[in-house]
Amino acid sequence: MLETMTPIPRAEKELRKQQTRQGLRRLSGLQLSIRENKLPVIVLVEGWSAAGKGSVISELIQELDPRFYNVISFDTPTETEKRHPWLWRYFTQIPAYGKIQFLDAGWMEQTARDYLEQRLSQEELESRQQSIRRFERQLCDDGYLLVRLFLHISAKEQKKRLDALEEGPDTSWRVGKFDRWQNEHYPQVEQVYDQLLQNTQTDAYPWHIIDASNTKSALPVILKLLCDSIEQALAHKPTSGIAPTQFSVVSMPPIASVPLDKTISKKEYKKQLKHYQNRLKELHNRLYRRRIPVIIAYEGWDAAGKGGNIRRIANALDARGFEVHPIASPTPDELHHQYLWRFWKRLPKNGHIAIFDRTWYGRVMVERIEGFCTEQQWKRAYAEMNEFEEELMDWGGVVVKFWIHIDPDTQLERFTLRQNTPEKRWKITDEDWRNREKWPQYEQAVDEMLQKTSTARAPWHIIESKDKRYARIKAMKILVEAIEKALEKDKRC
Amino acid sequence: MLETMTPIPRAEKELRKQQTRQGLRRLSGLQLSIRENKLPVIVLVEGWSAAGKGSVISELIQELDPRFYNVISFDTPTETEKRHPWLWRYFTQIPAYGKIQFLDAGWMEQTARDYLEQRLSQEELESRQQSIRRFERQLCDDGYLLVRLFLHISAKEQKKRLDALEEGPDTSWRVGKFDRWQNEHYPQVEQVYDQLLQNTQTDAYPWHIIDASNTKSALPVILKLLCDSIEQALAHKPTSGIAPTQFSVVSMPPIASVPLDKTISKKEYKKQLKHYQNRLKELHNRLYRRRIPVIIAYEGWDAAGKGGNIRRIANALDARGFEVHPIASPTPDELHHQYLWRFWKRLPKNGHIAIFDRTWYGRVMVERIEGFCTEQQWKRAYAEMNEFEEELMDWGGVVVKFWIHIDPDTQLERFTLRQNTPEKRWKITDEDWRNREKWPQYEQAVDEMLQKTSTARAPWHIIESKDKRYARIKAMKILVEAIEKALEKDKRC
């Protein structure tokens, strides 16, 4: 049974009103500090149908400046949302630093409903809960304040409200089939919510069960809770631990030890290229029909030949079914969100292929080395990136990661060639030369990245690219085999 | 009958291949100039089903750097797209300056199909064509290069290809009902395409009808055409005329002549506020159910009271059904697109209300006065903004525009108060004081804006805001009446 917070005793109407007014003023007073301290706040309002989630939110925002908050109401997922990982609709919409966001239900309601309507097995439900825990932890580690409310009403109260809504000519449309079903199966639904709340309960951001049988009494309670949480968050920056990576990893050789003498003859290259491109073309067609998404991550040294490698793969694909995402420095807007946000936003629809020319791994390479993030942030990122990819694979995605490898001498040759060839000069900048001086630091970062993120399900592939032709064929072969395996597995399901 | 460009004579296979290779190299060579000159290029590939639109695009991009182009394939509109103006899916996806975009069919195919499948009346078809002409003209006036191809094949060739696709186990799914229907009703479809092409034909960006009966012969033709167009665009910046505003406007008084002595008692204010807020709440519910979108545009002097005015309206609305968009300076990404792009992106779904705190009219006020755009650009903008709003109203939207008005003395009083009140100080910046010095220039710009964009369908409402309470009630009353009118009209349909 859900245990609710004791509502304030039914004090006189006046006292309650006064407390609400004070609470609204206090919240309004806090919004400037939220903005100045760049604190992002998510207020997740979950609860029973007809518990008053919408009304509560409407009351809470009364005194707020519309520039600093937004409200999102999550309906049944749209077609587009259904073609993405289930968390996609939530992750892509997290608020920017310094803003407050109110969610009228979210991942809890969707999960409960998906399970109750038998779109999730017990096992899938477990996996969902894990993905919720990771998602919320990632946000909180990044400094998001997450306030989670569950508005609780009894079966009797719910029935009364649904009846009343149904009687009103302007409100009857609000009562859907699922709302009634929920009321008729109240104990069963309660059990599911109970389990979900317990399994996602944490000390850092506890669930607050609110007695919502009287919205007017609930309001001062919620306002106090919300304001207290905000003040606390403003006072103490959370000191997040570094989440232990719980993924089994495959062993990787130190990058400097990889021999770079592999080559292929021009003739053999042409033959193999044709073979793999034709094969890839066929496979792309099947992926599309089976709605399997593919995410290809390219990392590697400057001038290692990423661009040409990508182009050979892209050339084999149907232009309508893939996208290449060159990843440059984050925009100001991207810097105002958790760092994985910009990658969530670039995920392909299922059936499509996304090729990332540089990736989320920038966090543990350039951002680490240039000091664009704190030590705690990049150390935490290994686990976060493993979790991110896990989410993609649970969605059914094929994740293939390439490290395009050369040695410092080869890089120097290619840099010099670029510098001396007018139509290639745009490809080389002062920054490339500066990065080159940091080769040893990068090497160390790359090694650590390969060790910590070469998970059994999504290992790194080192592509020897001193001979670019050899590299192209090797990458294609790995990609083709990964897709074949996924299609095979999908067939068996 | 469609007249096709003469294909190159069936030269030997080798010659054709050579020309294609040369064309691809030439296109690849041009991409750097495109980028450096920040030229945005849209290659719209329309044509019959099975004419090879996808294959042509796949060939064209062979040598291009994936960082500089993208391909969009427009399927049947999604739910989300259907809840927006029909042009929304196209406008929100225009490429950034310096990029090439290939569209695998677009507004032509959608329009032809909507008409053929009887989702558009003859009259609506006319209006669609006008909206296409305006859309394309706006892009070209902004410096976009638009290359439009129509891939033409005969009914017999089309049947042959559809049969072949249907026989292949991996390709049969590509043949949809509409493709067959198109083939069976070839003459009827041809007539519609003919009409569409003729009615959207212009000198600036002509339609190119390509004989696509042999893709390999068509490629060198298309490549030449595309490269020639790009070179031409790089050589000459288009000197766009200023589109005459074709909208009937209502007469507006010079802003300085508007008396500001209107007031309301506190008691009367409270009474009226309650009345209109309740009414607005009811109406919001109905708008939602009838899926009518509302767009509210707020402009006005600094410290005129826009924020408080907006908040009184927002407070009456269901938090799940509206959004407030504060409009600040454009982001770098927004500066790399036609200036209306960022407003298209913020349009509400139908049934929702979007409140803009400052708007697209910034073009003819701050951007004009501060020189952030050229004279030609802001002069052109009056018509463009009228057209934008026309598009919203044709979609069924209610457009309400407020000019929140005070005099210079009132502004000075409020600025001083803000400066002297610690918790209000963030609201005032040096820029506000600088803008204040330019009052006469702004006044002139405001007058011109009111004269030129107060269209009969979307007039400006001047809201006297020396007494902020009076202003709030007046704005609400106007909004309520506009919504009532729209609901009344919608009922009659």
Image (cartoon, coloured by chain):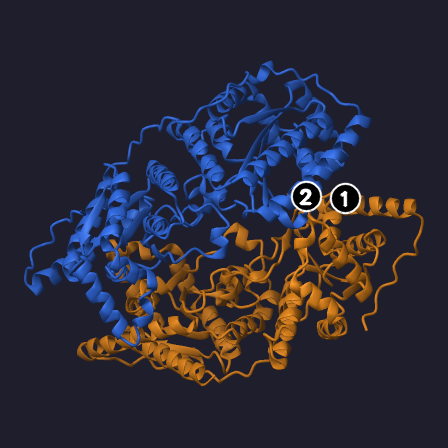
Chain colours: A blue, B orange
Q: Mark 2 Cα within 10 Å, few/some/many (few <14, many 20+)?
A: many
Q: Nearer the viewer, residue A453 or B258?
A: A453
Q: Which residue sits at x=55%, y=16%?
A: A253
Tell me the element at label 1: helix
Toward which corner of the image does residue A328 lie, by quadrant?
top right
- Residue B34 in sight: yes
From what the image shows, is residue A488 above or below residue A222?
Answer: above
Tell me the element at label 2: loop
Chain to which mark 2 belongs: A
Q: Residue furthest front?
A: A492
Q: Which residue sits at x=79%, y=46%?
A: B24
- Mark 1 = which residue? B29
- Residue B98 in sight: no
Q: Nearer the viewer, residue A227 or A487?
A: A487
Q: Circles 1 and 2: CB distance less than 8 Å?
A: no
Chain to which mark 1 belongs: B
- Mark 2 = which residue? A317
